[in-house]
Image (spheres, grey):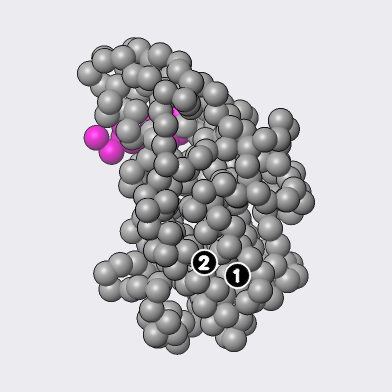
Amino acid sequence: MSKIWVIGGSGQLGNEFQVIAKSDKTNEFHFSDLPEFNLLNEKDISKALNDIQPDTVINAAAYTAVDQAEAEPEKAYAINATAVGKLAELCAKKKIFLIHISTDFVFDGKRSKPYHEDCSACPNGTYAASKHKGEIEVLLNTKHAAIVRTSWLYGNFGHNFMKTIQEKGSNGNELKVVVDQCGTPTWSYDLAEVCLKLTAKRQEIKGVELFHYSNEGVATWYDFAWEILSLTGEKPNILPVSSNEFPRPAPRPAYSVMDKTKIKNFLGIRIPHWKESLNNCITKQKKKK
């Protein structure tokens, strides 16, 4: 049985691992998060590693307030980069496999075809730059890890685009949603399952490997919002608009679709289309009510 320590256990992705843990017979899960555990505290990391003695650490914790990061760069870098470097260093000392979750935001969005792992990162904004720095810290501080970039994460836990659209669209009022940003919505449950598949094949990973994972397909935020309301049972009342109508402190990549060939070949998996996964997610949501 493999021991897995999930950092950020009460977050959107962390909660998906908690759901999986209830029926998983092959892994022993341990979860940590604020306030009991602080990723910025090296003593907390060392104590958890000594107490749990995990085979794999999954870092699902991050500073994700994209716009707020412009006003709090020190905090963003501390969580997304400095703490990640220390975590990687401590995992290396104990020869523990690390899975670190990163983002499509490391790309500037100027490309017109899917980004593969060999594409050069060109982050815009503090959040994006801090996440890219976190990737570098993993590369510099450990010799056995997987960095998994993902995009447009949503699910039934935490705050995310799907839940916001459901809340705002339930009264029938017109919603304005941008139509000039393209990416791929990714169900957090699917990402959690892929991380566990990587854990199972960790011995086949030599050094630090970079993987891209999202669901299949391409969508604009407008497409995503329309599908959310349709599947929820609401009549979509959405006006497509330019991102210029929603000026924000931090830039967003206009195109951030990622090529998933590498992870599909390595794991031998079929990745579901984003509409298929969104339907499964909302079906689960309805069963809970």
Q: Is residue 78 above or below residue 211?
A: below
Q: Is residue 285 in view from this perspective? A: yes
- Residue in view at x 66 percent, y 69 percent: 139
Report the magenta residues as a range: 279-289
The quarter in which the C terminus is drawn is: top left
Residue 229 on the magenta segment: no
Amino acid type, mark 1: Glu
- Residue in view at x 61 percent, y 69 percent: 138
Q: Which residue is mark 2?
A: 81
Instruction: Tell me the tag on residue 137.
Output: 1
Quadrant position of residue 30: bottom left
Lateral position of residue 164 relative to residue 26, left or right: left
Between residues 42 and 234, which one lies in front from this camera angle? 42
Q: Is residue 86 above or below residue 12?
A: below
Q: Is residue 191 in view from this perspective? A: no
Answer few, some or many: residues within 10 Å of disc 1's Cα (few below 14, many 20 plus, some between 14 and 19): many
- The answer to whether the residue labelled 1 contacts the one labelled 2, judged by CB atoms less than 8 Å apart, is yes
Answer few, some or many: residues within 10 Å of disc 2's Cα (few below 14, many 20 plus, some between 14 and 19): many
Instruction: Tell me the tag on residue 116.
Output: none
Amino acid type, mark 2: Ala
Between residues 195 and 283, which one lies in front from this camera angle? 195
